[in-house]
Image (tube, rainbow, N blue to C red):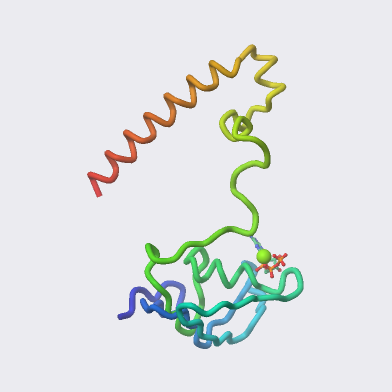
Amino acid sequence: MICSTRGGAKIVESDNIIFKDVPILSPNSDVLVPNMTFEIKPGMHLMISGPNGCGKSSLFRILGELWPATGGTVYKPSLDKIFYIPQRPYLPYGTLRDQLIYPDLVSTQKKKNITDEVSKFISFNFYSNFNKFSKKSDSVT
Ligand SMILES: Nc1ncnc2c1ncn2[C@@H]1O[C@H](COP(=O)(O)OP(=O)(O)OP(=O)(O)O)[C@@H](O)[C@H]1O
Ligand SMILES: [Mg+2]
């Protein structure tokens, strides 16, 4: 079943991950790999290695549909059956406190006289409302 033809490549739902003649391009359209072809079956392990900038992460951006592929066919499981861990974390480095007060720093919070108790209160309210909002969105979609 063809799910989409976004960017010129066909995306087909499949248990196996298959790239068939898929060009790997950089965002400036530099050709990193002219035609990539490989197949990974469930249970297989594959390590992709290569020098910096050769296109390893770009391959995963195509697989995750972050970037469109310009040609060929990508066979892959549906988005709810596949999980990606990014090369670099999206969260700032640091403690749980650093995540909760971001973009403030502990020193900024001290200057503003915001104690841990106030931070906890703000975070609790933020996440409670966020949960309510996500439940509402779930029921709408
Ligand atoms: N967000 C971006 N915007 C513009 N160009 C990018 C972006 N991300 C990567 N590139 C360029 O695309 C090319 C491939 O990058 P990619 O991140 O796929 O390489 P990589 O093999 O994963 O490298 P590394 O080993 O450093 O992780 C590089 O030339 C890089 O400069
Ligand atoms: Mg990378």
Horizontal arrangement in the rendering, residue 106 relative to residue 59 (left or right): right
The percent coordinates of residue 83 (x first, y second) are 47, 62
Q: Is residue 65 above or below residue 109?
A: below
The extreme top residue here reads 113
Horizontal arrangement in the rendering, residue 129 relative to residue 24 (left or right): left
Which quadrant of the view contains residue 117? top right
Along the viewing direction, whichever of 27 and 87 lies nearer the viewer? 87
Which quadrant of the view contains residue 88? bottom right
Q: Residue at horizontal 53%, vertical 87%? A: 21
The percent coordinates of residue 80 (x first, y second) are 37, 62
Q: Is residue 26 above or below residue 101?
A: below
Q: Residue at horizontal 61%, vertical 75%? A: 25
The extreme right residue here reads 51
The percent coordinates of residue 99 (x first, y second) are 59, 35
Horizontal arrangement in the rendering, residue 104 relative to residue 20 (left or right): right
> Which image quadrant shows ligand 2?
bottom right
Q: Residue at horizontal 67%, vertical 38%? A: 94
The percent coordinates of residue 112 (x first, y second) are 65, 14
